[in-house]
Image (cartoon, grey):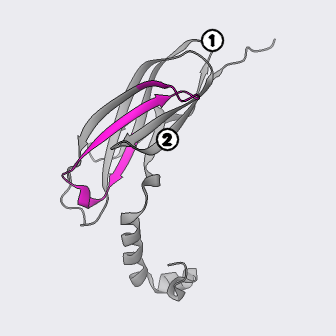
Amino acid sequence: LATDARFASWLLRNDNAGALMPLLEARFRTKARSHWVALLADYANVTSEGKLNIMGVFDTIWAEKFPTVHPQMQLILRLEANPAEAGSRKKLEIKLMTEDGRNMFSIGAEMGLEVKDPSKPVGELMKIDQIIGLGNLRFDRSGSYQFAILVNEETKKIVPLKVRQRQAASG
């Protein structure tokens, strides 16, 4: 698309939108999964209309002392799958890793990719929202951690988490 003269400027793209849109839609259907959402937050839910609500996004936990226990967080995932994958099953695994590569814990499940809304256009990516509540996670020391999200044993996304000690207020 970058070398196609019909789309060389904004005005040309606008004039040729009828040709451009199907090309973009085809490209988006096959793009890499780097656009998946994966983050940590204090709270999330999915409405009955399918809206994913996320509140209190963070990537750092501040602790007074170590070891520390973080009472509650949610790992929010919005995964996307090609319609050709409908009806298949995928193995989802989430690992919390320390900065030295040690696995603190892992959880896994098998998920089925089902078409939930048959009225969506053919070819539109299927969205799968997952909200995973994590309670009372213990961190023995300050450091950099990461949640690795794997699908069928292939890493799809990394969610970094820093755990830091809060400095005492000078006074």
Q: Secondary structure at mark 2?
A: strand
Image quarter hosting the C terminus: top right
Can you tell which of label 1 and label 2 is closer to the viewer? 2
x, y percent for residue 100: 58, 28
Indicate the amino acid at tag 2: Ile
Which element type, helix, strand or loop, lies under badge 1? loop
> Would residue 22 appear left or right of 87 to someone viewing this image?
right
Q: Residue at x 34, y 46 (%)?
A: 51
Q: Position of residue 5 (x, y in %)?
A: 54, 88
Vertical comparison of 138 with 60: above or below: above
- Number of numbered callouts drawn: 2
Mark 1 or mark 2: which comes first in sequence? 1
Above or below residue 151? Residue 16 is below
Task: Confirm whether the magenta stretch covers residue 56.
Answer: no
> Where are the magenta residues, as a range?
77-105
- Residue 65 bears which disc, if any? 1
Quick one: label 1, few (<14), some, or many (20+) residues within 10 Å? Answer: some
Image position of 31 with respect to 153: above or below: below
Instruction: For residue 157, say whether it is visible.
Output: yes
State which quadrant residue 108 falls in: top left
Judged from this view, the residue extending furthest toward the right is 171
Magenta segment includes 103: yes
Residue closer to the observer: 135 or 32: 32
Q: What is the x, y in percent for residue 135?
A: 41, 20
Q: Which residue is mark 2?
A: 158
At label 2, counting other C-alpha atoms closer than 10 Å, the crowd grade (few under 14, some 14-19, many 20 or more) is some
Q: CA distance from mark 1 to mark 2?
A: 26 Å
Q: Position of residue 113 (x, y in %)?
A: 23, 49
